[in-house]
Image (cartoon, grey):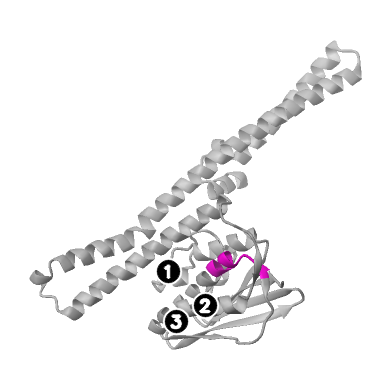
């Protein structure tokens, strides 16, 4: 029963298509075949060394076949899972902004009939812009995930200032933070340079800062701090927003996962940002962590090797 649940959860395929189940069945077949050939050999062969060699050879061949078959089915199962995830994106993540775009554009196209004043038209244009940005971010997220998984991203490391990079990303989000009445406070002190991939770390910072602003209440602040420990430089980003429920913490880095409290508050998101952060840090062989208390605060942090 546990095997069936694991297959359903991981691959969402019938039991007979599950790689683990197939490997189990092949194992049973190998064991049965080994015993059969051993008994057969004992009956018709005299030399025990020759018998052992034949049984070992047969078991090895069957094991290789089992491995190849299992890996093939695992690839098919993963493809099926990716297909289901893509359908989920199309049906949920894209439908909402597309519907808003269509509705707003149709309403604006009949502005004379609807007697729209300039202020109302601007509101609809802002709605179109906002939903276009949501779609663009979703597509960018999917592209970076694909490139990381296919190992098509340049992972070359170099020396750079994490402090300067953080300040650059903060400037990118000043307008968004100002619109949300959120103030970003960044610790301005001299910190050593780090040795990592600046392009990928910029993506991590963008996702973490974007989340911190999005989940913060109005008239609050986001704090960014640095801490040197041994040969590592850590960076933490703290917001005082909705927090992460205890039962959601173990799944927070899963693809498409969003905690129930942010869904209930209707905070827009794709559920890909933290998954991308985790994927990048794993690619760079660095650590990312978080601490959170629901309704109080959340801190995400990562560390990089000091140059």
Quick check: is 278 in the magenta stretch? no
Task: Answer above or below: position of 279 versus 293.
Answer: above
Q: Position of residue 39 (x, y in %)?
A: 81, 19
State which quadrant residue 198 falls in.
bottom right
Q: Is residue 196 magenta?
A: yes
| Disc 1 from disc 3: Cα separation | 25 Å
**Is 87 left or right of 128, judged from the image as shown?**
right
Determine which residue is flagged by label 3. Answer: 174
Residue 288, image quadrant: bottom right
The residue identified by callout 1 is: 263
Label disc, if present, on residue 107 of the rendered structure? none
Residue found farthest to the top: 44
Front position in the image: 270 or 261: 270
Picture disc at residue 168: 2
Q: Residue 226 versus residue 248: which sits nearer the camera?
A: 226
Residue 28 seen from this side: no
Q: Residue at x 48, y 73 (%)?
A: 210
């Amino acid at each position: 029963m546990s095997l069936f649940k694991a297959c359903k959860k991981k691959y969402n395929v019938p039991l007979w298509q599950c790689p683990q189940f197939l490997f189990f069945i092949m194992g049973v077949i190998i064991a049965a075949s080994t015993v059969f050939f051993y008994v057969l050999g004992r009956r018709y062969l005299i030399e025990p060394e020759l018998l052992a060699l034949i049984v070992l050879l047969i078991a090895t061949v069957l094991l290789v076949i089992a491995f190849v078959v299992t890996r093939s089915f695992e690839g098919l199962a993963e493809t099926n899972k990716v297909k289901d995830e893509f359908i989920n994106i199309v049906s949920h993540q894209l439908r909402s902004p597309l519907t808003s775009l269509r509705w707003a554009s149709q309403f604006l196209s009949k502005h004379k009939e609807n007697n729209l004043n300039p202020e109302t038209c601007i509101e609809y244009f802002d709605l179109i812009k906002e939903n276009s940005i949501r779609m663009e971010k979703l597509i960018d997220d999917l592209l970076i995930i694909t490139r990381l998984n296919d190992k098509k991203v340049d992972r070359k490391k170099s020396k750079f200032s994490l402090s300067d990079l953080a300040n650059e990303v903060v400037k990118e989000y000043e307008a968004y933070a100002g619109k949300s009445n959120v103030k970003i406070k960044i610790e301005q002190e001299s910190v050593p340079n780090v040795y990592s991939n600046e392009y990928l770390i910029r993506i991590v910072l963008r996702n973490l800062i974007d989340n911190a602003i999005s989940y913060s209440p109005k008239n609050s602040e986001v704090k960014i701090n640095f801490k040197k420990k041994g040969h590592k430089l850590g960076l933490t980003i703290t917001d005082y927003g909705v927090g992460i429920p205890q039962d959601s913490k173990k799944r927070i880095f899963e693809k498409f996962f969003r905690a129930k409290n942010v869904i209930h508050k209707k905070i827009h998101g794709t559920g890909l940002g933290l998954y991308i952060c985790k994927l990048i840090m794993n690619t760079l062989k660095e650590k990312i962590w978080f601490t959170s208390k629901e309704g109080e605060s959340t801190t995400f942090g990562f560390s990089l090797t000091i140059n």
